[in-house]
Amino acid sequence: MALVTPEELKNEFKKMLSDKSPGPSGTYRMLQAGDTDLQGLILIFLNGLWGCRTQPTEWQLSFIQPIFEGHSKDKTDPAS
């Protein structure tokens, strides 16, 4: 179980679609624009969770609901 590297974190931030963020508007843009100090703190946080094999209670209580994205797509297809 390898820890997340700074390069992996930067690559994932680059993949984020800045106009498709969950929660408050601009969340992904803030992460993408963050300097190395912010990214370092996020890296420490994520690796700390990974190393301790734990997660915040709020994450455990969250509910993920799939959203159907197309009228012409098959509703049983996970890609829709």
Image (cartoon, rainbow, N blue to C red):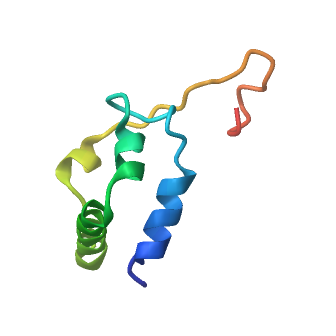
- Extreme residue in the right direction: 72
- Extreme residue in the left direction: 57
Determine whether 73 is above or below 62 in the image.
above
Q: Is residue 37 left or right of residue 30?
A: left
**Closer to the camera in the image, 35 or 70:** 35
Q: Is residue 14 left or right of residue 60?
A: right
Residue at point 30%, 40% (across, down): 62
Determine whether 2 is above or below 34 in the image.
below
**Residue 61 screen position, x and y as percent:** 25, 42
Determine whether 60 is above or below 49 in the image.
above
* Res. 54 in view: no
* Res. 39 in view: yes
**Residue 77 screen position, x and y as percent:** 73, 35
Quarter of image, res 47: bottom left
The quarter in which the C terminus is drawn is top right
Residue at point 46%, 64% (across, down): 10
- Extreme residue in the bottom direction: 2
Q: Is residue 7 left or right of residue 52?
A: right
The quarter in which the N terminus is drawn is bottom left
Residue at point 27%, 73% (across, down): 53
**Closer to the camera in the image, 15 or 48:** 15
**Residue 38 screen position, x and y as percent:** 26, 60
**Closer to the camera in the image, 47 or 7:** 7
